[in-house]
Amino acid sequence: MDRVFIEGLEVDTLIGAYDWERGIRQCLRLDLTLGWDIRPAAAGDDLAKALDYAAVTQAIDRFAASSRFELVETFAERLASTLMEDFGIPWLRLRVTKPGVNTRASALGVEIERGCL
């Protein structure tokens, strides 16, 4: 299985368990590795057979704009499920980083893997 990646994608969303977080949009940084067979697209230089980065990032933007979760874990789980279902992605690794949450750490977050490689 080949892997397509998107690194350092920043999205704004409503996320957080504390009252002060519920009224502001916060930045999350996403790193994705997506299992995808690139051979059909590469063989014919055919975008229609490739995993379209623009479409994936637009779907992520729409998801982030409409989500309202307390936990980064929930954001990651639901986004992974949405991407796998909408694009037919058989496997993915998603790292969701919430920068600036803790003064002693540059960022906190979760990393999940779903599906079969």
Image: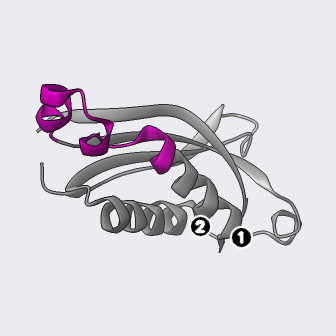
The Cα–Cα distance between marks 1 and 2, rounded to whole angstroms, is 7 Å
| Residue 4 magenta-highlighted | no
Residue 67, position in %: x, y?
Answer: 65, 70
Q: Is residue 58 above or below residue 70?
A: above
Return the residue at label 1.
Answer: 17
Instruction: Confirm whether residue 15 shows in the render.
Output: no
Q: Which residues are magenta?
A: 37-56
* Number of the label disc, if any, that sits on residue 71: 2
Taking depth in this image into account, of 41 and 67 the one nearest to the observer is 41
Instruction: Confirm whether residue 87 shows in the render.
Output: yes
| Callout 2 secondary element | loop
* Number of the label disc, if any, that sits on residue 69: none
The residue under the point 40% across, 48% down is 94
User: Dot 2: within a 10 Å radius of its alpha carbon, few (fewer than 14), some, or many (20 or more) residues?
Assistant: few
The residue under the point 26% across, 55% down is 89
Residue 85, position in %: x, y?
Answer: 32, 68
Q: Could you tell me if the residues under marks 1 and 2 are in contact, i.e. CB atoms within 8 Å?
A: yes
The residue under the point 57% across, 51% down is 58
Taking depth in this image into account, of 87 and 112 the one nearest to the observer is 87
Q: Is residue 69 above or below residue 94?
A: below
Residue 68, position in %: x, y?
Answer: 68, 73
Left or right: where 34 falls relative to 29 = left
| Callout 1 secondary element | loop
Left or right: where 70 falls relative to 72 = right
Left or right: where 52 falls relative to 55 = left
Q: Is residue 89 above or below residue 74?
A: above
Q: Quadrant of the N terminus?
A: top left
The amino acid type found where label 1 is placed reads: Ala
Closer to the chain start, of discs 1 and 2, is 1
The image quadrant that residue 34 belongs to is top left
